[in-house]
Each structure stands twice: as C-alpha cells, then as structure tokens.
Image (cartoon, coloured by chain):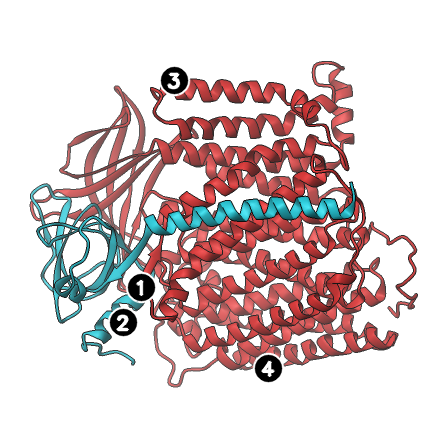
Amino acid sequence: MTRKRRRLYIVLLGMLILGVATALVLTAFEDSIVFFHSPTDIATKDLPKDRRFRVGGVVVADSIKRDTDGVTIRFGLTDLANTVAVTYRGVLPDLFREGQGAVVEGKLGADGVFRADEVLAKHDETYMPKEVADALKKSGQWKGKP
Amino acid sequence: MIPEIGHFAIALALVMALVQGIAPLVGAARGNATWMELARPAARGQFLFTALAFACLTQAFVTSDFSVAVVASNSHTLKPMLYKVAGVWGNHEGSMLMWVLILTIFGLMVAEFGHNLPPSLRARVLGVHGLIAIGFFAFILFTSNPFDRLDPAPLQGQGLNPLLQDPGLAFHPPFLYLGYVGFSMAFSFAVAALIEGRVDPAWARWVRPWTLAAWCALTVGISLGSWWAYYELGWGGWWFWDPVENASFMPWLAGTALLHSSIVVEKRDALKSWTVLLAIVTFALSILGTFLVRSGVLTSVHAFATDPSRGVFILVLLVMIVGGALTLYMIRAPQLKGGGLFSPISREGALVLNNLLLATATAVVFLGTLYPLALDAVGGGKVSVGAPFFTATFVPIMSPILIACVIGPVLGWKRGDLGAALKRLRIALLIAVAIVLVTWYAASGNQVFSALGLGVAAWLIIGSFIDLAGRIGFFRVSPMEMVRRAVNLPRSAWGTAFAHAGLGIFVAGVTASSSWQTEQVQLMRTGDTVPLAGYSVTFEGVKELKGPNYEAIRGSFTVRQGDRVIARLSPEKRFYPAEKSQTTEAAIHTTWLADIYTVLGDKDKSGGWSTRFYHNPLVPWIWAGVMVMALGGGISLTDRRLRVGAPRRAAGPSAPPVPTGA
C-alpha cells in the first residue's frame, strides 16, 4: 500500500465519521435544544405547548405552596413585569428560596401553568443566573450592576 | 507581612519565568550552551518562589488572617482544618495559584530529571513552558492577586460555600489541575519539536509519560467531581452534561486520543503531524476549560459568581498560546514526513480509528457546549443544550470504539488478520452475545440498547484480558510459569488491558444505572414505610444536632429486605449560619450491585417530610471502572520504556552535541 493510498483511506474514513456525526448533531439539535423564555415571553407570545423550554425569574415572595400530597410544589416565577405559575414535584434544591433567582425546565400546560420537571440549583447564593439577569434587564426591573 | 512576601514571591516567579521563557529559546537558536542552561536554574527558582507564595497563602488560610481579601471571603474560624487548607484552592485566586504551582512543578521535573533529553530540546521545552508561565503569572498579578489586603480587616470571614466543604471536592481541583497542566508538558514538547523541525519515535517516548501522568490525574479528577455531584447535590445523577463538566471532559477526550496516537509515533514513526496537532489542541482545550469555568460565560449548574474581565484575560492568553502554536504548526508540519506504512486492518489502523472517533466526539461535545454561547453572541436567542443532545450524538459516535478497542490490541502492527484476532477473542464474543440475549430476554425484549450495553461491557472486560491470558498460558502451564510469564509481559500491555477493562466496568455501570434506576418522591410521617425496588424503607423520625460549623436535621430511615434490616440511613439537611446557606447530605447504602440513595427534603405544614429515594443499579461500577482505567494508566507509566531516564535518541543527523553545564 502506498502512502497516498493510505492517506486516501484515512481521509475517506474521516469524512464518513464526520458525515455521520454531522447528521447526528443536526437531528439532535432539532429535537433536543431547549430554548429560554422569560415570564413576559410566556404572557405575550404564543409559545408551543408540546416543547420543553426553560423559564427564569425571581421566585415570588410568599408564593411557595405545597399540595396536599406534600411533594408537589407551586410557586410563581416573575421578571417583575409578568409572573408565571409553576408546579414541580420533588425535592427543591437547597439554594431555592423566595426572592431569589431560579431557572426551571419543563413544558407549559394548556392552563398556562408551567410544569417543571427540573429546578436548576446554583452552587452560589449570590449568583444570579445570566438568563434571569437578562430577563430582568429586558423588563426594566434590573437593580444590580448594568 | 507574610502575605506581602507571598505577593513579592509571585513577582519574582514572573521574573524567573521571563528568564526561562526567553534565554533558553534564544540560546537554542544560536547554539549558545550557557543561555540554554539558564532554563534549569530558572525553572528551579520559579518553582521555589511559587511554592513560597502558595505556602504564604496557606498560612493565611490556616491562621484565618482576614486582612487578606480572599481569606475573608472564603474562610471562617469555625471551619474544620481540612477545609481551611482546601479553601486555599476553593476560590478563584487560590486555584489559579495552584494552577501555576503545578505548572512549575512539571517544569522542575523536566529540569531535574530530563538528563537524557538532547540539551537543545530540553532548553526549548523549558523555554516554551516558561512562556506559558509568563502568561499565567501576569494573569495572577494583574487580575487575580490572592494577596490583596482588606483595610480594615473584618473580624470574621464569610466562610466557604458549604457545598464545597466536602472531602471529595477538596481533592477534586488538585487532580483536575494536575491533568490540565500536565498536558502543558505535551504542548511544550510539541512546540519544541516544531521549532526543531523533528518528531521521531524517541520524541514520542519522551512525551508519553507526561501525557499518561496528566491523563491519569485528569481521569481521577473528573471522577472525583462526578462522585461529589452524585452524593452531594442530592439529585441521584452523576453526570449532567453540564458545560462545566464538559469543559473538563473535552481535554480528557483529546488527551485520550493523544495518548493513543503517540503510540503510533513511537512504534511506527507515523501520524507525526497529527500527534503534534493533538498535543496543541489538548492543551488548548485545557485552557478553554479553565476559561469556561472561570469566566462565567456559560450558564451552568456548577457556576460560581465570576468576574468577566478575568475571562477576557484568559481568552487573550488562549488566543496567543494556541494561535502562536498553530501558526508554527502551519509552517513546520509539512516538513514532518511520516514513516511506516500500514494496511487499514492493523494495530495502527485501529489506533487511527480510535483517533478519528475520539476527535469527532470531542468536536461534538465542543459544539454542544459552545453552541448556546455562540447563538447568544449573534443574538439568536437563548437556548440550552442538555443531556438529550449528548446522548443522541456522543453515544453513537463512541460505540464503535468500545467494540474496536478490544480487537485493536490483538491485531499485529503493519498488517493484521481480523479473522485470527476474532478467533483469539471468541470466548469473549460468545459470553458477550450470551449476556445480550439473557438481558434481552429478562427485560421481556423491549430494552435492546440496555442489553447491548451490558454485552459490550462484558466484551470489553473479558476481551481485554483474554489475549493476555493466552500469552501467559492460562490453564496450560504450571502456576509458577504463569506468574513468571505474567511478570515478563510488558507493563504497557497490562496497562492497556486494565484501562480497557475499566472502560467496560464503566459501561456496565452507566447502562444499568440509566436503564433501571428507580426514583420515588413522597411525603412521609414518622413510622411510614414505602417500598423501593424490592426493599422497604421506613421513616424513623428526625432529630436535630450540631456540627462544628453547622446545624443539622438528621432523618433516620431503616431499609429492609423482607424482615431483614439491610441498612440504617441518616440523610441530613444542614444549615451553615456563617454562609447563611443550606445543604443536603444524601445517605447512601451501597451493595456494590446497587446504591440505595436517600434524601431528606422539606417539612410540610402537617408535620410530614418530603423524601426522595433512588435505587441505582450498578452505579458504584461507574467510579470503580474509572479508577481501574486510571490504574491501567498508572501501570503503563511503570513500563520500563517510559522511564524518564531510559529512552535515548538513536544517533541522528541533527541535534548538535552541546555539553551539559550542570
């Protein structure tokens, strides 16, 4: 086998693998990318009901309620212009509390209540999720550093 | 006073780095032995001053000197000693100091133990290493000085984030950085070789131990981080495809490719320019990892509050280091003529396949991690790319490697015989197929991928050792003879077998835990019992207790199988008054075949507690497998060929003889 031949084989194999990878990436992007929306987006835009997305905002004070089963939690998430009601079943992360930023992931129900199956915890209590900060800036309610 | 000494020491280390980064390179270009020899004292001095600075910072943490800003914002007098010490690198400034400390340790090792390197190569390696060090010392001095003072000094510190007060995480950063920074050695060797215009098997033999050591450390570091996430975050998962996790995983993937391609350079004198490129890319990804974690540009579950100006500095460093290296690569790579020819079915062919797949997998992870950032930068909206994306792309790309990495080591160099190789592996193949069928049948035929996953795991574990078993004459010769032959096999063959088998153990753990995990969330009152995957869990109540720097509520649960008590578990909720934050301590009972994982949630108004239980089959195998992989790397590292002193370059046309001064 000549050097050129060998290089040809390697290049062909490389192209094949790259092609498969590209196809995989494109289909996966189609199906599994999760968009981020603010509570104002939910209130003003017609968002698809069957797609997962993330919502970020500040947990409304005194809004955390528990259902009678004790493990389903309801709370409001606000960008201080609009508020969306969220339900979540499970144990909340430690740094989740009223008046603090939070990001949730799930689907929007037909009743306008967001059904979260994931509440993202941060390791740091002073950390404001970037999306939440941007959502607050967009709604004109941002009080922190510009 | 001591912090000022530390600050001054960093400045002196920077001066040493300047000497090390300039003099040896100029000396090597001009053939001036005295200038080249300057690299060694400079590397020693750099290490000494950095170690001094690190010692000063440690002293500030241990004595809780709150006049130092970093200590005040990351420590507390009540913190246990382990975490006071771990606090040194539990923050940005200190962790960067640790980064350069490790960098200088590697430099020192080359200076002290690199006697067998040709003097010009050693000078150039140390010179490039010095250039990297200049960048990072400047970074520390200008943007993240760990010795900044506070005036007036606060009476008490703000404490360390309680999530980080954990033994697993205390040792996670040192290992991770050993890995990241260890790849800088491969980078320096690659750039030095490009400057010399010469890459040969001897070069590969010199680079390999550094790469291998870095790879082992990174493997241990990543698995410590994942283990910590598993038991500390209380989500029952161990890998979330989170950007910060990916940031450490990308250099690991590229480093694994580098490890394998350098074998081809060493044995067959081929794939040279590719290997050099991989060495550059691996270190670039290591710096990128540092940048992603430290800059806060990515939304991550592991994100910490950060300062963007630092991110820009690291980004500039990244562009300079990688840009410089790649430019040099562009100029010099065409001169690196490949040697040995090989057919597609051969050990080299298998290693090429490994490299193509690992490189593609790295690219996919890179794309998934940085796509949200790129899209946001061009105003395309905010998105997140999560686990489903990586499962759909990464797993199919990596699957062929799992099959091939058993066959590869059995194939001959240059021209292999696939039929003969499979014949030697037939027992592994039979057992693997049997396991697929049994699992498939037991799962009533609807879990094809889980069955295949377990089959591949068996293929990897058995297949990796079966060839070695044949070579030591298993069951065919006397035990003494077997031991003798086993000892005489090259250590690197044993290392390969262990690393690949470890991968198999890992695959078994991943498959079983993702296929058959049971999760249960419920409200429980004292005395309640719930079933969990064939066990029953009884809630015995809670009690309050006080730790050294926290208050805790401890729940107690009794796990029974039938009437037999299997375990008593006590998950806690801890409140740290100093940091005003709360953590969840999961309690885990492991049987090695499964974990029973309990988390205590919040109290309900009616007096019940929300609780979360998981039954995670084979989860301990994940970390056990990774540790076996790292062990394999360690065994390889002891191979005679790889001892730093051993390899000598065959007398070649270049490399002018320069007397060593020391």
> What subunit carries mark 1?
B
Residue in view at x 71 percent, y 61 percent: B190
Tell me if residue B72 can be seen: yes
In the image, B359 versus B610, the foreground residue is B359
**3D distance between C-alphas at marks 1 and 3:** 44 Å
In front of the other: label 1 or label 3?
1
Tag 1: amino acid: Lys
Determine which residue is flagged by label 3.
Answer: B441
Question: Which of the numbered marks, if any, corresponds to residue B382?
Answer: 1
At numbered mark 4, what does the secondary structure look like: helix, strand or loop? helix
* Nearer-the-camera pick, B569 or B395: B395
Say which amino acid is labelled 2: Asp
B403, A117: nearer the viewer: B403
Q: N-terminal of the two: label 4 or label 3?
A: 4
The disc numbered 2 marks a residue on which chain? A
Determine whether the residue tagged by mark 1 lies in a helix, strand or loop: loop
